Structures are given as structure tokens and as C-alpha cells.
Amino acid sequence: MSVLSHLQNTADSIKIQDSERTAIDTSIGSLSYKLGSYFNNIESKFVFGSYDRRTILRRSKDPNSDVDYMVVFSDGSSWTPQTLMNRLKKFAEDKYSRSEIYQSSPTVVLELNHIKFELAPAYSSWGTLYIPAPASDYSQWISTKPNTLKDALNEKNRNNQYLIRKLVRLMKYWNVNNGKVYSSYELEKYVIDKSFWLCSNLKEYFYSAVEGLETWNLAQYKKDKVNRLKEIVAKTKDYERNNMPISAESEIKKAIP
């Protein structure tokens, strides 16, 4: 093994496997059918977020992995976000009575055995989607473009040897193992926006991503975790420069087990 092969193998092992995706897709189909039969005022409904972007971690690696699912109500503009969340919560309680169901603003969480759904209410006006606004404590609406990050990720991935999704998963894996120093969205956005000069393989992309992490706006305990990660990468590179591949691999496993 080597640092590169370890990172490659880990990036593949932490992604949702085909059998898991098949089971989740079946549950998505069932959810879509139940929503359609329960409501007569749904304009559209669809998966978005990390599952749609294929950057989600398998649940065995991140117990909080979830599928974001947007429900666009045709009469949503006439109501507050809470009213629509109440609708979704009542739906979940009626159709999934044996599952754990609770509100986690601005979504209704539906926990099944193999996956967790976060149902997000929305409405559409003149081609623009509106979701509950964080700045209003989710009591008002704000416009959104749920495919913007996905489109940017797809382009970044194509232009970087199709290694960006793997890199995002590795960064998320470290993040989960360290108590979510950053939000998943922040990490994905950071990787998408970052320039990776002269990187030719996943190891070099990972090193570059780690070395560029910002800590100025983090609490001290989070800064310590990021600085520890940077120290591990620096020491790993030292071992490699000194032709000590076994020590290098052992060192990187302290960050990416």
C-alpha cells in the first residue's frame, strides 16, 4: 500500500455502494408515490443535496447521512413555512407511523431503517423556488437554486480528472470523524471554489485541499483539529520525501483511517 492507494481505496469504500443506492432509490420511489397520493396540491417533488450530487457518505461512516427531498406546494406562497412543515409532518405520521419523525427546522425528518429523509417544503413563483429562510428563523421564504452547486461540482469534476467527488468524500470523512468542524455544504463549496494547480492524483488534491483550509472564523477547539490535520499532512509529506512510504501511510491514517 501507499498513501495514494490508501486514499483511493478509502474514497471508494466510504461512498454509498450500488446495493445501498438501489434500496434508497426504492424508498425514494415509495415516498414520491405516497406524497402524490396524499396531497393534491404538489407542483413537483425531487431529491437534491449530497445524495443527488453523489457526495454523500454511506451511513456506516456517517450516521447522519440523509437524503434531502424537496416538496413544492402549488399553494405554498399563501402560507408560512411552518404551515407547510406541519403538512409534511402530518403526512409522515400518517404514512410512516412506525418510523421516527420530527421537525428539524427547516425540514421534517423521516428516519427509516436504512436512510434518513429530510423533507423540505417549498413553493415556486415565475420559475424561482422559495424555501424557508434561515435569517428569519425559518418563518419567511427565500429564493434558492438547488441545482447550482450540483452543476458547479459536475463541471469541476470533469475539469479535474474526475477526482473532485472522491476528494469531497475524503474531506467529509475527516470532518465527520472530527465532530463536523465544517458544515458539509461549506466543505463542498470550498473544494469546488478552490484552484488545484499542478495536482495530478487524488493524494496531491487531498494535500492541496487540506493545506488551504481556513480557520480564522472557527472556535479554538475546531482550529486545533484543522491544525492537527495540517500537521499530519506535513509529516506525511516529510516521510515521502525521505523515502519512508510505510511511515507515510501510517501517518496519513491518523487523519483518514
Image (cartoon, rainbow, N blue to C red):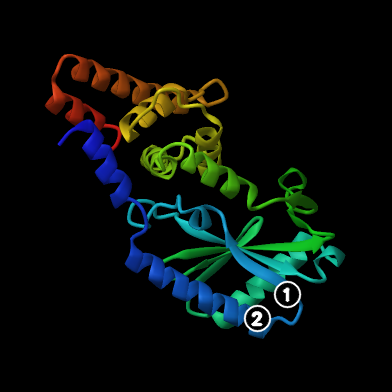
The quadrant of the rendering that contains the C terminus is: top left
Work out whether residue 199 can be spotted: yes
Q: Residue at x 65, y 53 (%)?
A: 146
Dividing the picture into quadrants, the one containing residue 170 is top left
Q: Residue at x 79, y 71 (%)?
A: 74
Name the residue that disc number 1 marks.
42
* Mark 2, secondary structure of its residue: helix
User: What amino acid does circle 2 point to?
Assistant: Gly
Mark 1 closeness class: few <14, some 14–19, many ≥20 residues within 10 Å: some
Q: Are marks 1 and 2 in contact (CB under 8 Å)?
A: yes
As drawn, 47 above or below 42: above
The quadrant of the rendering that contains the N terminus is: top left
Give the distance between the C-alpha atoms of the residues marked 1 and 2, in whole angstroms: 7 Å
Q: Residue furthest right?
A: 78
Q: Residue at x 59, y 48 (%)?
A: 151
* Mark 1, secondary structure of its residue: strand
Give x and y (percent) for residue 185: 55, 43
Q: Nearer the viewer, residue 4 or 118?
A: 4
Q: Which mark is residue 36?
A: 2
